[in-house]
Image (spheres, rainbow, N blue to C red):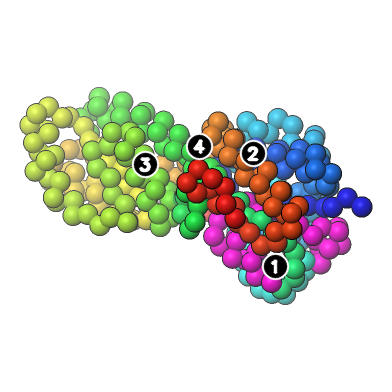
């Protein structure tokens, strides 16, 4: 009898999940397994939205952002009675292995699920926030950074034309990674992130000197974690006399077609996950650390 393996997406979707689904189906079949999709994350596990997957389901999806099988944040999966139903659903299909694309919370849920129900799982870090302990890279980050880069480049055009300051707010939940990398790679004048407390007034003399030497626009990249974009905008108006606009990039950062790097990482993460489960690893998360994959 062929072994059956399922995959689901949990939490905020990322661009890179569809390439991961494609590799999952193709590699599972190549290894003699039967692949299954679970639609809408842990919610779908509870509602038995578990269906066999084949080549036709994944043809053409490598270019698309989001996830073909949907994602969700499940409150019900936090309750053990619903986890029992989820396990019964998997067993009714004969599935004993599950790959989860998600973040920390999803992996904690799976760890508990494994301890209670013995369903083997392998987690693949997938969040644009890049905030999962132990891995240097989470699927989707590179595409999100590309989206932010494009937005900032475009905002710069109008900022320069209008002699304005722009405060650009990036996602990341409590983590400043997206803001920091974006600020460094787009030439922003200011970057504010939760990891490094900053007194914005300390920048004033330097900014005034820049204006005196011809600067006529500012780009500030601010992490959503600080919840102070409007205050920073008011500061530019009051202290530097620059008309200022706030641009909240929001969910645009979760979209867009997957970058080459995310397509490649999706391929590699899934390959390692299937190999790990086939070799009997039962409750692991694949981390990408110092250019190597580790469990
Ligand atoms: O965790 C991914 C993320 O996009 C965060 O950066 C952001 O704070 C949050 O999800 C937004 O959540 P929602 O999609 O529920 O609005």
Q: Residue at x 41, y 37 (%)?
A: 148
Q: Quadrant of the C terminus?
A: bottom right
Q: Earlier in the sequence, mark 1 or mark 2?
A: 1
Q: Nearer the viewer, mark 4 or mark 2?
A: 2
Q: Could you say whether the residue bearing mark 4 is in a helix, strand or loop?
A: helix
Q: Nearer the viewer, mark 4 or mark 1?
A: 1
Residue 58 is at least partly visible in this image: yes
Between the residue at mark 1 and the residue at mark 2, the CA separation in whole angstroms equals 25 Å
| Residue 183 falls left or right of residue 257 | left
Indicate the position of residue 137 as horizontal and vertical percent values.
50, 46
Q: Which mark is residue 143?
A: 4
Q: Residue at x 44, y 45 (%)?
A: 250
Q: Which mark is residue 114?
A: 1
Q: Could you say whether the residue bearing mark 2 is in a helix, strand or loop?
A: helix
Image quadrant assignment for residue 66: top right
Residue where numbered disc 2 is placed:
267
Residue where numbered disc 3 is placed:
181
Q: Is residue 96 magenta?
A: yes
Q: Give the residues in magenta.
A: 88-115
Indicate the position of residue 113 as horizontal and vertical percent values.
69, 68
Tell whether label 2 touches label 1 (CB within 8 Å): no
Indicate the position of residue 176 as horizontal and vertical percent values.
37, 51
Residue density around tag 4, few if under 14, some if 14–19, many if 20 or more, within 10 Å: many
């Amino acid at each position: 009898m062929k072994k059956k393996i399922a995959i689901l997406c949990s939490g905020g979707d990322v661009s890179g999940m569809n390439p991961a689904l494609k590799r999952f189906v193709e590699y599972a079949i190549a290894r003699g397994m039967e692949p299954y999709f679970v639609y809408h994350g842990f919610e779908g596990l509870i509602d038995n939205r578990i269906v066999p997957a084949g080549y036709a389901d994944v043809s053409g999806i490598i270019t698309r952002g989001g996830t073909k099988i949907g994602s969700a944040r499940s409150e019900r999966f936090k309750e053990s009675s619903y986890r029992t139903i989820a396990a019964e659903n998997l067993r009714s299909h004969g599935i004993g292995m599950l790959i989860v694309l998600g973040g920390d919370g999803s992996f904690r849920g799976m760890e508990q699920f494994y301890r209670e129900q013995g369903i083997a799982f392998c987690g693949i870090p997938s969040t644009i926030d890049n905030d999962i302990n132990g891995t240097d890279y989470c699927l989707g980050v590179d595409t999100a950074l590309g989206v932010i880069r494009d937005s900032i480049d475009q905002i710069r055009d109008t900022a320069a034309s209008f002699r304005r300051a722009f405060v650009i707010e990036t996602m990341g939940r409590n983590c400043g990674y997206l803001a920091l990398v974006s600020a460094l790679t787009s030439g922003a004048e200011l970057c504010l992130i939760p990891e490094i407390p900053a007194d914005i007034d300390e920048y004033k003399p330097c900014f005034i000197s820049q204006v005196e030497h011809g600067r006529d626009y500012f780009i500030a990249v601010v992490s959503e974690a600080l919840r102070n974009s409007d205050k920073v905008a008011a500061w530019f108006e009051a202290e530097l006399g620059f008309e200022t606009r706030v641009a909240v990039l929001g969910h645009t950062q979760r979209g867009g077609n997957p970058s080459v790097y995310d397509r490649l990482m999706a391929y590699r993460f899934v390959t390692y996950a299937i190999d790990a489960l086939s070799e009997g690893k039962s409750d692991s998360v694949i981390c990408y650390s110092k250019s190597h994959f580790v469990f």
